[in-house]
Image (tube, grey):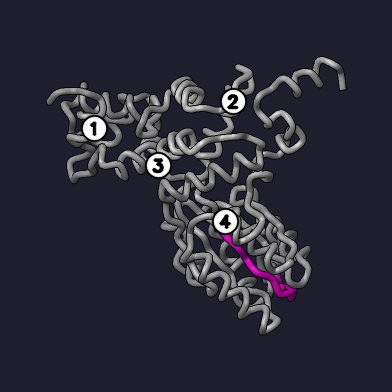
Amino acid sequence: MSSTSKAARQDSPNKALDKAPDDLFLDTTLRPSSWNEYVGQKTIKDNLKVLLRAAAERKHPPEHILFYGPPGLGKTTLAHLIAKETASQLKATSGPAIEKVGDLASILTNLAPGDMLFIDEIHRLNKAIEEVLYPAMESGSLDIIIGKGPSARTIQLELPPFTLLAATTRVALLSSPLRSRFSGGTFRLEFYTEKEIQEIIHRSARLLGIDIDEKSSKKIAERSRFTPRTANFLLKRVRDLAQVEKMAVSVGIVDKALAMLGIDELGLTQTDRDLLRTLIDKFGGGPVGLNTLAASLSEEEATVEEVHEPYLLQLGLIERTPRGRKATDKAFDHLKIKR
């Protein structure tokens, strides 16, 4: 290491520079490695502990489990924790990555007894692949059709005992037959409380070597949209600014970093505020249809509906009515606009 690099490490008031190797895989570094480290989702954790312990006592693989809920709440983390707690090997893939029946067959036949298969965004599996997955989940067999027409024949392959862990942000898009085969349970992840988010921020700060006080962590937590992934993202950007400016993390650094990201005191981004302003300035507060609102913002309808609306609805800044979207009094007050 050059003398300049060593000096930079010594001169920095922030310990984050000493954690450089971990920064290569920050998401892995910040991921909880035990139930005690996993903050929040107490009901789900309690149910999973019972399910896993009962399966271990029967010496059977755990039953198939489905997690659903908004992005960033810890679905993938739970899958990794389950594999770790059961000392199982986890094979991970995603719905879009499994394009053909042969892809799924290859994955399933390469599993070892007791392995766990994690499929993220499982709602994006096509129906033909779902049909092959049913017998694999239910009876541990894989039915494959070889050939076409009159000469076609079906062969059945026996699969080793395995557990399917699945995650989705849009559970309604899963077919009923597929949902019903998650015999271990279907669990919905809830948004976190501000106190839980603050606890996550302090844990992440310790792992990243950041000294952060209560006031600074509270400011980040208040703007984290009740989501751990967002909280960790904001913490990392605060750390970056503190490192570049050769300062310790403080309320002033937090305020400056969040201002640079365009995030206000409610955690709204510039696009969130643009949506509210468009709804108020162009349409008098509404109601206005989703397609018209999206066109006015030059955004796709799905982006407005799935990315921006859920948080605005949660804060009570907009309402969905039969005639369209409508800004609430709280939205007018937040933007300091008189009716």
The one of 252 and 310 positioned closer to us in this rendering:
252
Return the x and y of residue 118 as percentages of the image width and height: 64, 58
In which quadrant is the C terminus drawn? top left
* Helix, strand or loop for disc 2: loop
Q: Is residue 178 above or below residue 29?
A: below
Could you tell me how far apart the alpha carbons at marks 1 and 3 are, in whole angstroms?
Answer: 19 Å
Amino acid found under the numbered disc labelled 1: Ala
Tell me which label, 4 or 2, sits earlier in the chain: 4
The secondary structure that most of the magenta stretch takes on is strand
In which quadrant is the N terminus drawn? top right
Residue 162 in magenta? yes
Decide: marks 1, 3 in contact (CB < 8 A)?
A: no
Amino acid found under the numbered disc labelled 2: Ala
Return the x and y of residue 318 as percentages of the image width and height: 25, 38
Decide: marks 4, 3 in contact (CB < 8 A)?
A: no
Return the x and y of residue 231 as percentages of the image width and height: 50, 39
Tell me which label, 2 or 3, sits earlier in the chain: 2
Tell me which label, 4 or 3, sits earlier in the chain: 4
**Res. 99 in view:** no
Q: Nearer the viewer, mark 2 or mark 1?
A: 2
Structural crowding at the residue carrying mark 1, measured as other residues with C-alpha within 10 Å and reported as few (<14), some (14–19) or many (≥20): many
Along the horizontal axis of the image, is 273 left or right of 321? right
Q: Residue at x 43, y 23 (%)?
A: 262
Tell me which label, 2 or 1, sits earlier in the chain: 2
Find disc 1 in the rendering and name its residue: 331
Amino acid found under the numbered disc labelled 4: Tyr
Q: In which quarter of the image is residue 114?
A: bottom right
Residue 248 numbered tag: 2
Q: Residue at x 57, y 75 (%)?
A: 51
Find disc 3 in the rendering and name its residue: 306
* Helix, strand or loop for disc 4: loop
* Helix, strand or loop for disc 3: helix
